Structure formats: C-alpha cells, structure tokens
Image (spheres, helix red, strand yellow):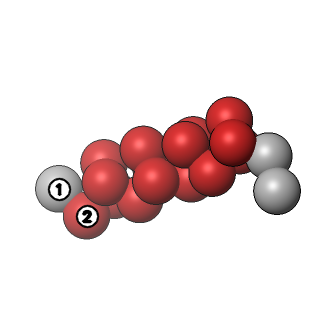
Amino acid sequence: MNYMSTLEHCYCFFICFV
C-alpha cells in the first residue's frame, strides 16, 4: 500500500467532509 496515496485519500476525504 502506498503511504502517499493513503495520505492523499485521507486529505481529500477530510476536505470533502468539511
């Protein structure tokens, strides 16, 4: 699993959530 990919996913999810 790519760490950067996971980080981007969490970041995008956080923005979409907010």
Instruction: Tell me the crowding category of disc 1: few under 14, some 14 to 19, or many 20 or more residues within 10 angstroms, Cα based.
Output: few
Q: Are the residues at dot 2 and dot 1 in contact (C-beta closer than 8 Å)?
A: yes
What crowding class fits label 2: few (fewer than 14 Cα within 10 Å), some (14-19), or many (20 or more)?
few
Near-viewer residue (3 or 5): 3
Q: Judging from the image, what secondary structure is the residue with disc 2 in?
A: helix
Answer with left or right where residue 13 lies relative to residue 7. left
Residue found farthest to the top = 4
**Where residue 18 appears, x then y in whole percent?**
17, 56
Q: Which residue is mark 1?
A: 18
Q: On the picture, is 9 further left or further right than 5?
A: left
Q: Secondary structure at mark 1?
A: loop
Q: Quadrant of residue 1?
A: bottom right
- The residue labelled by disc 2 is 17
Q: Label 2 is placed on what type of residue?
A: Phe
Q: Amino acid at mark 1?
A: Val
Q: Position of residue 11 (x, y in %)?
A: 42, 44
Q: Nearer the viewer, residue 14 or 16?
A: 14
- Nearer to me, 8 or 2: 2
Could you give the CA–CA distance between mark 2 and mark 1, rounded to whole angstroms?
4 Å
Q: Is residue 11 left or right of residue 8?
A: left
Q: Quadrant of residue 13?
A: bottom left
Q: Residue at x 31, y 54 (%)?
A: 14
Residue at the spot 69% in from the left edge and 42% down from the top edge: 3
